Image (cartoon, coloured by chain):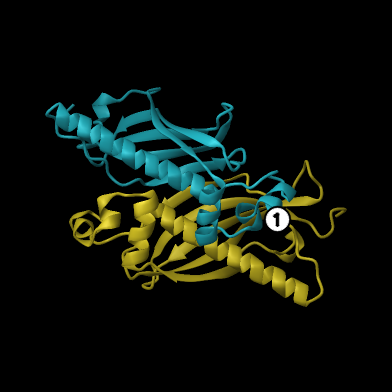
Chain colours: A yellow, B cyan
Amino acid sequence: MRYLEDMEVGQRRDLGSFTFTADLIKAFAAQFDPQPFHLDEEEGRKSLFGGLSASGWHIASIWMKLAVADGQREAADAAARGEKPAMWGPSPGFRDLRWIKPVLAGDTISYASEVQSLRASRSRPEWGVLQMRNTGTNQRGELVFSFLASVFVQRRHPQD
Amino acid sequence: MRYLEDMEVGQRRDLGSFTFTADLIKAFAAQFDPQPFHLDEEEGRKSLFGGLSASGWHIASIWMKLAVADGQREAADAAARGEKPAMWGPSPGFRDLRWIKPVLAGDTISYASEVQSLRASRSRPEWGVLQMRNTGTNQRGELVFSFLASVFVQRRHPQD
């Protein structure tokens, strides 16, 4: 994890990609979102999605999975440089969660995170508040998923 | 699923409750959110959550599971009355997704949905737009989870 001072508005980080196979779509849906168009190809084709489509919460949960892996890579890189990785605090919440297009069986979604705004926390001088736009884009370059996250991020120089 | 005309602002529907056991918390986290405080009791105790805590996406996914089951119950009730259940369209998105307090192993969360606003769709006269505040409350009556959903809902009388 980076410190507030290591980031700037517009900075983008690729989080990796994930292929939503029919089996994975159905396994998530069976556990958490058992709607017919997430469970069965034929029902998916008859639905307005036009095919077996992943649950929106599956798409969001895979974002989380890739974001955690990315944070672990960043922490390992920092450790390799002999640095202490910054702490990131809890998120006060997410805004504007949108599933813009369906994710169908076989689609590969590439996730990315872009810094939208940065500021010092007024109440807690050792922390900053970071707003990040998180996105998922399919193999045709179409935006399919987006949300805005606010996160508390440690500052390297709280006295600034 | 109900028609737009069958709902009014302030109407609340209980969606059911769910107990987040340690095993279920760890199983979700291992698949989608492998952060130490979601995977291990001791790491949870050391974290600012103060115990093994459920992933926010797990909390949201269980809301989805209960909402789907509730919709199926409503459809069955409508069929039993000899009615055709209303169609609900896709959601244009969710707003203000907030995890207000941690959900720790053993907590039982009761989910509910309350109608916040209703209006006819200007562009599609056969549909209305419903805003619902969805919440999760723990066994001590504390609000732990909340988001605002917009959904397209079929109108019974599109000519009105």
Q: B12 or A150, which is in the foreground?
A: B12
Any part of residue A134 in sight: no
**What amino acid is labelled 1 in the image?**
Trp
In the rendered image of this protein, does residue A89 appear above or below residue A113? above
Crowdedness of circle 1 by 10 Å Cα count: few (<14), some, many (20+)? many
The answer to whether A158 is drawn above or below residue A142 in the figure is above
Residue farthest to the bottom, as pictured: A80
State the residue at coordinates (40%, 22%).
B10
Q: Nearer the viewer, residue A1 or A97?
A: A1
Q: Residue at x 53, y 50 (%)?
A: B23
Q: Which residue extends farthest left?
A: B82
Horizontal and vertical percent for residue A120? 75, 50
Instruction: State the image quarter where residue A137 is shown.
Output: bottom left
- Return the residue at label 1: A88
* In this rendering, position of residue B136 left or right of residue B3: right
The residue shown at (14%, 30%) is B83
In this image, A80 relative to A53: left or right?
right
